[in-house]
Image (spheres, coloured by chain):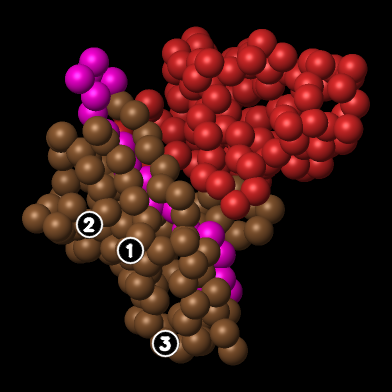
Chain colours: A red, B brown
Amino acid sequence: DTEVTQTPKHLVMGMTNKKSLKCEQHMGHRAMYWYKQKAKKPPELMFVYSYEKLSINESVPSRFSPECPNSSLLNLHLHALQPEDSALYLCASSSRTENTEAFFGQGTRLTVV
Amino acid sequence: AQSVTQLDSHVSVSEGTPVLLRCNYSSSYSPSLFWYVQHPNKGLQLLLKYTSAATLVKGINGFEAEFKKSETSFHLTKPSAHMSDAAEYFCVVSVLQNTGGFKTIFGAGTRLFVKA
């Protein structure tokens, strides 16, 4: 199984809502990532988890809260988002954080209204 | 500074003709290099990677790339374009930092159009 599965595929939320994005992989990868991608732009790294511990937070606002419950799961909790947070959110995993390819999920298309 | 530059924001080819997507990098150390493809509203899929083995790298769907250290380039090619190749392509560099960790840098992307 070489898939990274993200749910939901689409999400519309109000600025006062709380929602969560979910990501799952069963490749035994020990590094997992959240990226944000705006239209016609490359993905921007948000968070990196290595062995279930947060290793990189790219100065992401606190309204985004990551969680790694176990080595296969990665969540992104959303609260009090702004319309400019609307984007495609991509989860990825890799066997290690150094110098290796990442496997990406299909993404969650988030719209904040 | 370490960076990656995709030299064309858009490339348009006719079906059946060759594809060339250009990528240059800047790195103080010997980098690992990757090409990913992204179809609309989809995630990124790895096409191929260079990690200091053979300089000519073959990937999926008939794509290949050549690492040229003297030119600091890693251009992506395909002999004959197919309509299904129309997508966004990202050149990605993984570079070793002074701190000992690795940093992944994405190019801005090249949109490939394929005309029938």
* Residue in view at x 38 percent, y 38 percent: B105
Q: Amino acid at mark 1?
A: Arg
Q: In this view of the protein, which residue sits in the foreground, A62 or A98?
A: A62
Q: CA distance from mark 1 to mark 2?
A: 8 Å
Closer to the camera, B73 or B49?
Answer: B73
Drawn side of residue B92 relative to residue A43, left or right: left
Could you tell whether B70 is left or right of A95 in the image?
A: left
Label 1 element class: loop
Q: Three-letter amino acid code at disc 2?
A: Ser
Image mark 2: chain: B
Residue at image position (41%, 48%) is B107
Q: Earlier in the sequence, mark 1 or mark 2?
A: 1
How far apart in space, not on screen, are marks 1 and 3 (Cα)?
Answer: 16 Å
Q: Which mark is residue B73?
A: 2
Question: Can you give x and y, in whole percent of width and height, for residue B114 in the image?
Answer: 54, 79
Image quadrant occupied by the C terminus of chain A: top right
Q: Residue at x 65, y 58 (%)?
A: B40
- Along the polypeptide, which appears first: circle 1 or circle 3? 3
Determine if marks 2 and 3 fall on one subunit: yes
Q: Residues within 10 Å of mark 3 (few under 14, many from 20)?
A: few
Reading the image, the residue beneath label 1 is: B22
The chain to which mark 1 is attached is B
Q: On the image, numbered disc 3 is attached to which residue? A: B17
Q: Which residues are magenta?
A: B84-101
Above or below: residue B39 compared with residue A92: below
